[in-house]
Amino acid sequence: MKNDKAFYCNACGARYHKWLGKCEDCSQWNTIVEDISPSYTSKSTKIDFQTLSASNKEIERRLSDISEFDRVLGGGIVPGSVVLVGGDPGIGKSTLLLQVSAALSQDYSCVYISGEESAEQICIRAARLEMQDSSVKLACETDVDAIINSVGSNMDFLIIDSIQTLQCSSADSIPGTVAQVRTCAFKLINFAKSTNTAVFLIGHVTKEGAIAGPKILEHMVDTVLYFEGERGNSYRILRSVKNRYGPCDELGIFEMRNKGLVGVSNPSALFLTQRAENVPGSVVFSGIEGTRPILVEVQALVTRSYFSVPRRTVVGWDINRLLTVLAVIESKCKISFSSMDVCLNIAGGLRISEPACDLAVAVSLLSAASKKSIDRATCVFGEIGLTGEIRSVPRSSERIKEAEKLGFKTIILPESTNIQSSGIKLETVKSLTNAVELLEIDYS
């Protein structure tokens, strides 16, 4: 007889045809439970189809008047969209969305639902942020059906803090499990699409930094935002990793102050504010994050190692990329780092992922190793290939204009970049050895 039962793991969501004591995917014990699916009745009505031209009208976005938040969403909030916001504990997710709800309540109806704090605790935070007079409707509830029934169809915005605290009676498990998160998210998404209500979901993250719960949660929502930042740093970065209504990898820069988060309108000037003068190992990189150029300082420190295996420490960049750049320097420039500890830092807490930072990292390493400082008014960008060539990168004109706007006099860039500029001196390099010769770096 065929076994129609299905089982899944509460920890990772893996599915099985039979019960097991240990999950084969995540190696957790006693997390396999039976998947009790609700019965569905098929509809006898036919589906009404339409052409793509029937939905070509422009999307009317709603602005929160928090410019950095609207920028990350692609220019405003789309009615009926579902936005998932994740981040480390204490980074400021609840503070950010409480500020957003207070700003939206000036022109729209907004409800803030908390499943983690009491109403008194939220009111204390609102008083600290001087938002106690806003018209936000507040409630503390974890039953998703009660929330949907109470909000109704006449609400513009719904904020849930957090999705891991919600529960639904149709899912036989505790809040935060795969079944509960999936079921509650499905109901909230259906509610958002049917009532044209924009829904914001705050999500917890695991110790690895991913949003807790099933991966399908990120597939179901329209937009996924990550709120990042160092605890010892007052600056926060809101990063878009998925957006159906705008560009991905867009950044919003905020500064945490006593009265909440404040958007930073000129992040390039911010990241270069505390830059020291004439210090070896420091160079400015002109990068692109999302839709705008950002200038950041790349810092390198090279010292003699006292260990059998020299250390490689990286903050804000990919360590595998650093190892590749070190290998190319040693191969093409005949400069060895095998007996030295190397520390690399992207100043300001920003994380750079684009390959255009390769040349800036190489120049900072060579500068630190040779104890030769790079001119303060010089900016660098370019990708390094394994053969030592400097490859061109996209949107070079925007990088040059940003450097020129901030007063830089010289910019080192790939030779294959076909751009003319009268306001800034362009020094093109074909290979990494050309860059060493241009900067007159003598390592001996």
Image: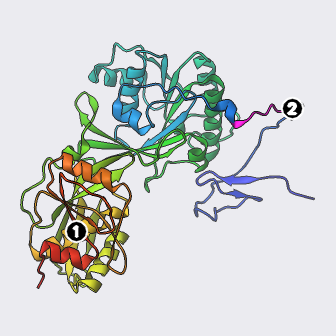
Residue type, label 1: Cys
Q: Position of residue 236 (x, y in %)?
A: 30, 42
Residue at 20%, 44% (x, y): give it: 270
Q: Quadrant of the N terminus?
A: bottom right
Q: Secondary structure at mark 1?
A: strand
Where 29 sits versus 273, above or below?
below
Residue at 53%, 38% (x, y): give it: 245
Residue at 8%, 63% (x, y): give it: 279
Q: Residue furthest left?
A: 278
In this rendering, position of residue 42 left or right of residue 340: right
Q: Is residue 361 magenta?
A: no
Q: Position of residue 154 (x, y in %)?
A: 58, 15
Mark 1 Cα shell of 10 Å, populated few (<14), some (14-19), many (≥20): some
Type of secondary structure dominating the magenta stretch: loop
Between 68 and 402, the one lying in front of the other is 402
Q: Position of residue 120 (x, y in %)?
A: 38, 20
Between 197 and 5, the one lying in front of the other is 197
In this rendering, position of residue 236 left or right of residue 176: left
Task: Tell me where the magenta segment starts and ends, as one range.
Answer: 45-52
Residue at 36%, 75% (x, y): give it: 385
Residue type, label 2: Lys
Q: Is residue 48 magenta?
A: yes
Q: Position of residue 229 (x, y in %)?
A: 31, 47
Q: Decide if residue 108 is in sight here.
A: yes
* Mark 1 in CB contact with mark 2 (< 8 angstroms): no
Q: Which residue is mark 1?
A: 343
For residue 239, which quarter of the picture?
top left
For residue 36, which quarter of the picture?
top right
- Report, in whole angstroms, how far the alpha carbon at label 1 lies from the one at label 2: 64 Å
In this rendering, position of residue 85 left or right of residue 3: left
Q: Quadrant of the C terminus?
A: bottom left
Q: Which residue is mark 2?
A: 46
